[in-house]
Image (cartoon, helix red, strand yellow):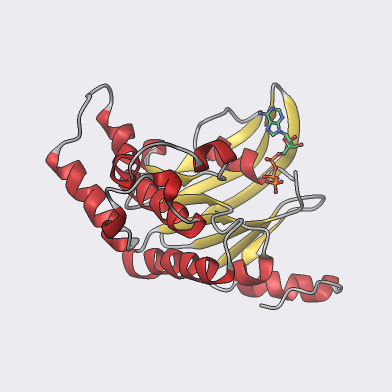
Amino acid sequence: MPQLTCENLTVGYDGKKVREDVSFAVERGDYLCIVGENGSGKTTLMKTILGLQSPISGKILMGEGLKPTEIGYLPQQTEVQKDFPASVREIVRSGCQSRCGLRPFYTRTEKQMAQEAMCKMRIDDLAGRCYRELSGGQQQRVLLARALCATQKMLLLDEPVSGLDPAATAEMYRLIEQLNREDGITILMISHDVGAAVKAASHVLHIGETTFFGTKAQYLHHIAQEGGDNTHV
Ligand SMILES: Nc1ncnc2c1ncn2[C@@H]1O[C@H](COP(=O)(O)OP(=O)(O)OP(=O)(O)O)[C@@H](O)[C@H]1O
């Protein structure tokens, strides 16, 4: 059984459909890139997979012992979050909260996990700094380290390079690819920049007027047949 399966999933708000009949499956270690026009429902789909909202219809099945609380999530950044007045260390550790329950402190293991995540994202030297004083690229690495505290299995990333300069974008893609290749973490990533995002992907899900799901090779073949697409992958 795949690690994650969505079967004829219809997502939306208050019974109002945003996207209908989305089906795809993700195996452990896959790198799925989710693309589609603005407002096509990519974020809504991600929130539904995370259990932050209910599907209107269809099924979400998890295999390989995956639990919804073991999925790491990097949400789309908002202006408010950019101004968050907490230290890098506090923010990264807060990623452990899904397993803390009501316990008001972090255990040694959790602190260690946060430390390892910071080292991996190369922000350990920023641990004591205030989040809002960091660059956009550094902030995204903090949030990725935070998401890593929740999981060793699967990460859902919503436009992780949005607003970053080319160097920070390349670094972010490199870190994500490293988590996928070296640590075997399954990646589901929403992106606008199809060309750059699809490079490291193993599979692509396009949602919009039409839905497409397949391997990267199938996707490239599909867009070549459709013609008129100017992505360089
Ligand atoms: N909380 C909400 N309540 C009602 N409708 C919402 C809510 N959030 C989003 N929507 C609507 O759902 C639709 C899909 O939004 P969503 O953010 O999932 O799209 P998206 O593909 O991620 O877009 P983008 O690429 O612009 O981030 C939009 O029409 C949006 O207005």
Q: Quadrant of the C terminus?
A: bottom right
* The image quadrant in which ligand 1 is located: top right
Question: Residue 101: percent from the left, percent from the top?
Answer: 28, 25
**In this picture, is 72 found above or below 214?**
above
Q: Quadrant of residue 14?
A: top right
Q: 150 or 17, which lies in front?
A: 150
Q: 69 or 120, which lies in front?
A: 120
Q: Residue pushed farthest front?
A: 133
Q: Quadrant of residue 107?
A: top left
Q: Is residue 201 visible?
A: no
Question: Residue 49: percent from the left, percent from the top?
Answer: 53, 39
Q: Is residue 65 left or right of residue 230?
A: left
Q: Quadrant of residue 192?
A: bottom right
Q: Is residue 17 left or right of residue 133?
A: right
Which residue is at a point 25% across and 48% down the rendered structure image?
114
Question: Residue 188: percent from the left, percent from the top?
Answer: 52, 54
Q: 157 or 162, which lies in front?
A: 162
Q: Is residue 220 left or right of residue 200?
A: right
Question: Residue 126: percent from the left, percent from the top?
Answer: 31, 55
Q: How many marks?
A: 0
Q: 100 or 169, which lies in front?
A: 169
Which residue is at a point 59% across and 53% down the rendered structure image?
159
Q: Is residue 38 visible?
A: yes
Q: Residue pushed farthest right?
A: 228
**In this picture, is 44 found above or below 30?**
above
Q: Is residue 40 left or right of residue 161?
A: right
